[in-house]
Image (cartoon, coloured by chain):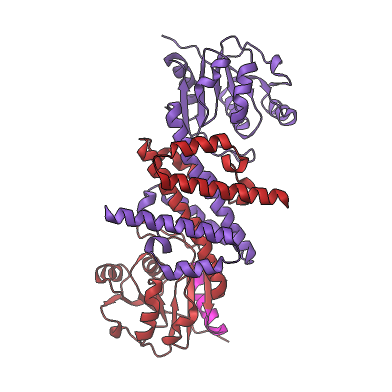
Chain colours: A purple, B red
Amino acid sequence: MILPSIETVVIVGSGNVATHFAEAIKKSGKKIIQIYSKHPNSAKLLSLETNSAFVKSINEITKEADLYILAINDNAIYEVASSIKIDNKLIVHTSGTVSAAVLHKASNNYGVIYPLQTFSKSSPVDWKTIPVFIEANNKENENILISFMKIIAANVTVMSSEKRKILHLSAVFVNNFVNYLYSIAEDIMQSNKIPFEYLKPLILETANKIITNNPVDIQTGPAKREDEKTIRKHLELLSYQKDYADIYSYLTNMIIKKHENKAKQ
Amino acid sequence: MILPSIETVVIVGSGNVATHFAEAIKKSGKKIIQIYSKHPNSAKLLSLETNSAFVKSINEITKEADLYILAINDNAIYEVASSIKIDNKLIVHTSGTVSAAVLHKASNNYGVIYPLQTFSKSSPVDWKTIPVFIEANNKENENILISFMKIIAANVTVMSSEKRKILHLSAVFVNNFVNYLYSIAEDIMQSNKIPFEYLKPLILETANKIITNNPVDIQTGPAKREDEKTIRKHLELLSYQKDYADIYSYLTNMIIKKHENKAKQ
């Protein structure tokens, strides 16, 4: 069976994810017909960059595209799916946490394209390294989406809504929470008039190490060693900022507990 | 004034830091005369690799070297400093948390060479990127240590014991605690039979982003957005593992609190 190929796309959204999708689709040789967003300024800019039309009302969205990509906030997906009129054309969202089935409101042909990466408009994206997870309401749509995304990305995998939610949850730990720890270190350094710059090689090497090691095997530091003297000194240094001292104690105790449990096994 | 140059070195220790120091010193053309360590096997190996002599007792350490580097655990520094006999030769340790003055027990000429990086024996080290922090008991020794380290490393800075402790504390946040979060994500993924591999591009990009951005400016995620629906879903997914749910709640509440405080300002 020859699958229908996606040649024309409508993008809903004009944020970080929408922008990187639009740029990649344009580069792949496919045609973006329209871009619709609640934020007209960024949407107009994105439509100019991608030779597509900006539409300012959801009712102006064409029914003629092969694929509709909702690259918008989780909370907006249900609302857009309820009001978009697309005659059962294929529609997807790009969210890690929202079920595919929410799109049933919009069409009988729906799915998810979830790229597991942190996007910002200003940073270029290397689609060759980003794992992309596909889900669809049936095998045919799944295959159509896989073929479409394989033109853009190197690492395309089918993943259920349930497992995709686990990916998103894990991403919160390694992206949001990790970045929060970076911001604490930045604040501690600045409060002591030391350039944050000095920490950057360590931050990069800490991330690079997991390429060839399991994180649990390379855990080091005063908590892992149960080095109470150093832990006490660190808590004294943090006594000026109770929240940071609390986070330090909390994570330290968790690491100690984890390694004691491991030792007992 | 022409400074005495360091030509010969004794290394005490044979762990990760000692190994990378020894390799770098050998490569710089300086001579490692002896290596002493409580762990004879790794010390013998390291002495073979660096054409130096292994000595098995602290009393066998020569008094003829220009510099003695204690690359050992914090807790062992005081003990070694109390028993080593080196006739007021220059001695340093490599610790982030121990004061330079502890080495007064060993010699009137002492200091610190603190490389701010995570070392493992198996990974090569790029000394061009590692910030190295120097402290010494007087200006002359400080200059001798700077000259010596500038042959090995590109980024050599004088830093007081007090500020060095802040560097070490901050390193715990961006290395030990971050790696712990990686290990939690690894465990969550494995428990759900999803390859940890999928998270690696996100981990690398999260670290890379801080090269050109301040962490506090690029914080994203359900906590930052105060997206209670997603937070609740994530806590449900973690209900099988109370510790992880607790860490999730704790860090989420801290991020919410931080951004509410920031908004009030």
Q: In which image quadrant can residue B85 be found?
A: bottom left
Q: Nearer the viewer, residue A53 or A95?
A: A95
Question: Is A72 placed above or below B18 here?
Answer: above
Residue B139 lies in magenta, yes or no? Answer: yes
Quadrant in the rendering for residue B142: bottom right
Q: Position of residue B13 (x, y in %)?
A: 34, 72
Residue at far bottom of view:
B87
Image-based side of B52 in relation to B180, left or right:
left
Q: Is residue A39 visible?
A: yes
Q: Is residue B33 magenta?
A: no
Residue B171 pos. (x, y %): 50, 61
Residue at 57% x, 39% y: name it: B222
User: Disc count in the image?
Assistant: 0
B37 lies left or right of B153: left
Find the magenta span and give its range: B136-158
In percent of the image, x 58 and y 25: which residue is there? A25
Residue B56, placed above or below residue B17:
below
Residue A152 visible to an observer of this rendering:
no
Q: Is residue A168 left or right of residue A187?
A: left
Figure check: A203 above or below A78: below
Which secondary structure type mostly characterizes the magenta part of the structure? helix
In percent of width and height, residue B215 lies at 60, 51
